[in-house]
Image: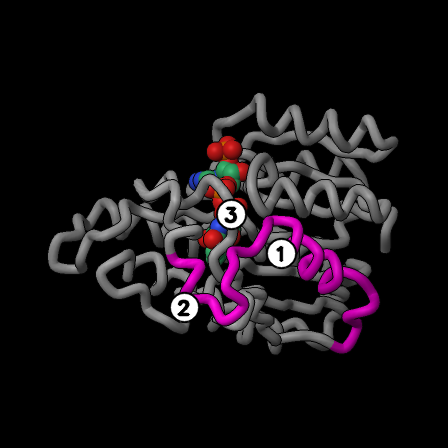
Amino acid sequence: MTDKVVVITGGSRGIGRATALAAAARGYRVVVGYASNQAAAKEVVAAIEARNGKAIAVKCDVGSEQDILALFKAADGFGTLGALVNNAGIVGKSGVRVDEMSAERIQQMMAVNVTGSILCAREAVKRMSTRHGGQGGVIVNLSSVAAKLGAPNTYVDYAASKGAIDSFTIGLGYEVANEGIRVAGIRPGLIDTDIHAAGGEPDRAHRLAHMVPMKRVGTADEIANAIVWLISDEASYVTSAILDVSGGR
Ligand code: NAP
């Protein structure tokens, strides 16, 4: 498995970046997807290559089916696909109630977080399923504890998109369970990344840390460690399962 290709959407920063480094350290060939920050993606590839790992950066906005097809074409040229990490995700501006949300915001949220993840999974299943002549593999979907909490007065649209990811993880897992593919989800809690700044609240994770039973934010590495365990053979009997990595939140 570890000589196979892992495609990580949104691998240029945050949890995706940490996962790219952790997967490369275990010997996987890493395809680092990114939306627009080419410099960050190139830095991840350089960091992997500096440690004698193998990686390529591929521009892929998961809101675009064309970009997704190009991402998997590039992955095909890099080796045999063994895993997909559906990590790319966005939040809208924090603190916007549903009765204030624009249709464009909600559509963008669903296009990136939900449709993008399902389309990437489609391409992965076509390549990994024994039904299609593949050798099996693993899909890990990034959800959020927001799927359980609903994120009222913060970003209900984001929470709903992650609820969809939870259902998708369970359903797809059952669909391909007998075709060599495991599907698992991770629900991170408050993790110290740029995503909070993207929602207009850079210190959000630290501000809310007191609400976490462990009384601290999590790191991108702590999520990455769970992801690389799920894609490894050590998790060989785990499918249609969702793991909270949230300090108890
Ligand atoms: P982040 O630090 O904001 O990084 C986002 C990554 O996704 C970047 O690599 C970015 O690429 C990429 N990206 C953004 N929009 C994209 C698009 N349309 N298509 C493809 N890639 C796109 O985010 P993060 O905190 O690491 O979050 C990663 C995942 O974990 C997300 O699914 C998020 O919902 C989930 N999560 C995070 C937390 C948390 O507290 N951080 C909690 C729960 C769940 P560029 O570098 O090119 O912009």
Q: Residue at x 64, y 67 (%)?
A: 183
Residue 212 in view in this figure:
yes
Q: Which residues are magenta?
A: 208-237
Instruction: Determine whether the residue tagged by mark 2 lies in a helix, strand or loop.
Output: helix
User: To which residue does mark 2 refer?
Assistant: 147
Q: Nearer the viewer, mark 2 or mark 1?
A: 1
User: To which residue does mark 3 refer?
Assistant: 192
* Circle 3 Cα neighbour tier, 10 Å, few/some/many (<14 / 14–19 / ≥20): many
Which residue type does callout 2 highlight?
A: Ala
Which residue type does callout 3 highlight?
A: Asp
* Circle 2 Cα neighbour tier, 10 Å, few/some/many (<14 / 14–19 / ≥20): many
Q: Is residue 223 above or below residue 42?
A: below
Q: Nearer the viewer, mark 3 or mark 2?
A: 3
Instruction: Determine whether the residue tagged by mark 3 lies in a helix, strand or loop.
Output: loop
Q: Residue at x 28, y 61 (%)?
A: 156
Closer to the chain start, of discs 1 and 3, is 3
Ligand 1 within 8 Å, label 1 CB: yes
Q: Is residue 28 magenta?
A: no
Q: Which quarter of the rendering shows the N terminus?
A: bottom right
Q: Which mark is residue 223?
A: 1
Closer to the chain start, of discs 3 and 2, is 2
Distance between the Cα atoms at labels 2 and 1? Answer: 17 Å
Instruction: Determine whether the residue tagged by mark 1 lies in a helix, strand or loop.
Output: helix
Q: Is residue 154 above or below residue 220?
A: below
Percent coordinates x, y for residue 38 in the rendering: 56, 24
Which quadrant would residue 27 be assigned to in this image?
top right
Distance between the Cα atoms at labels 3 and 2? Answer: 18 Å
Percent coordinates x, y for residue 57 in the rendering: 65, 30
Which residue type does callout 1 highlight?
A: Ile
* Circle 1 Cα neighbour tier, 10 Å, few/some/many (<14 / 14–19 / ≥20): many
